[in-house]
Amino acid sequence: MKISLITPAVKQSKNGNRTTALRWARLLRDAGHRVRIDVDYRGEATDLLLAIHVWRSAGAIQRYRQRLPNGPLVIGLGGTDVNTFLKSDPETTLRTMAMADALICLHDLIGEALPAPFRKKLHIVRQSALPLPGPRRPATQHFDICVIGHLRDEKDPFRTALAARQLPPDSRLRVIHLGKAHTAEYADQAVAEMAVNPRYRWLGEVPGWRVRRELAKTRLMVISSNQEGGANVVSEAIVAGVPVVASDIAGNIGILGRGYPGYYPVRDEAALARLLVRTETEAGFLDMLASHGRKLEPLFRAAHERAALNEIVNAAARSG
């Protein structure tokens, strides 16, 4: 098929929506489809529209439906669709979702947040990641852990830095934070945090190869978000063999599972600090987190994601 893939994230962006769009395009091309990525739908001929983010792509979806009332339409739900816009602008969000032949979500618990009529068209697609090119070699001088995420409110970006302030003086732990500051205020806050917190290093926005190098060096990844639609960085850590500590939000539990032992209460840096002490001082605890990740790793292989996407778009085309 000829597929138009719409994402609100511009070409130069390194945010989650753009990353997802590029990966989905590659996987669908591998499955034999022709895929064009754009930020809007402008009336071009296409066999199917695949839009990422309900609310931010609502205009493009509406224009597609006006041109092709029965055209196949698949929408990937963004985290803020469910956690923000379903509450702040339910009219636009629900109206747009109702147009879709299929909805894609990125973790197991999104269905619980949706009105019942939409659950029958909901499909779970776990985001895949590529393994590291070689074995991990964590640094030994410090107990380095990483935070991989842009500096914006949804990510609760400084929670790990605040937790690191509470560690005992003999701790060797350092926080390496990779991610773009979405505002000048966030950049200023990161710089100020480094000035008073010797355990915190912010490296700013970095290319994908630098993220993978950090995963090869780190002992642990922390995802501290206060909301997520299903973060690909969790898949990347699991496939890389990096243990994960996560806030106990639905977007993390829906990927890692309800029984995962590495959760802390969201926005609670004291609880996070206690977990970080355990990861540094209890080898058995870090090994337990890694063991859980190894059990999950087969779920995040590219072949699984490609097959799931291909099945969804083909079914939507048949019903359109």
Image: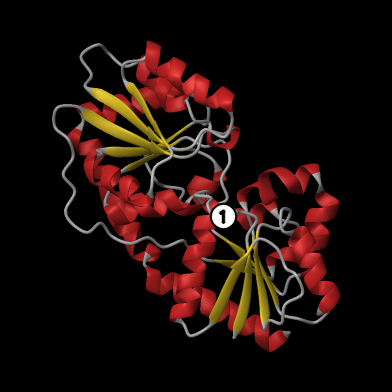
Pointer 1: residues within 10 angstroms few (<14), some, or many (20+)? some
Vertical side of 162 occupied by 12: above or below:
below
Residue visible at 25% across and 39% down in the picture:
218
Q: Quadrant of residue 76?
A: bottom right
Q: Position of residue 84 (x, y in %)?
A: 70, 43
Q: Quadrant of the C terminus?
A: bottom right
Where is residue 57? Give x, y as percent.
Answer: 72, 58
Q: Secondary structure at mark 1?
A: helix
Q: Position of residue 186 (x, y in %)?
A: 54, 26
Q: Mark 1 — residue? A: 17
Quarter residue 118 falls in: bottom right
User: Residue shown at 58%/23% (left/top)?
Assistant: 185
Seen from the viewer's position, the closer of residues 42 and 6 is 42
Q: Is residue 204 visible?
A: yes
Q: In the image, what residue occupies the spot 18% across and 56% down?
A: 134
Please give left or right for residue 100 compared with residue 167 in the image. right
Classify the position of the N terminus by image quarter: bottom right
Residue at 54% of width from left, 81% of height from top?
34
Name the foreground residue: 3 vs 107. 3
Q: How many marks?
A: 1
Relative horizontal placement of residue 285, taking residue 36 as reference (left or right)? left
| 203 vs 123: above or below | above
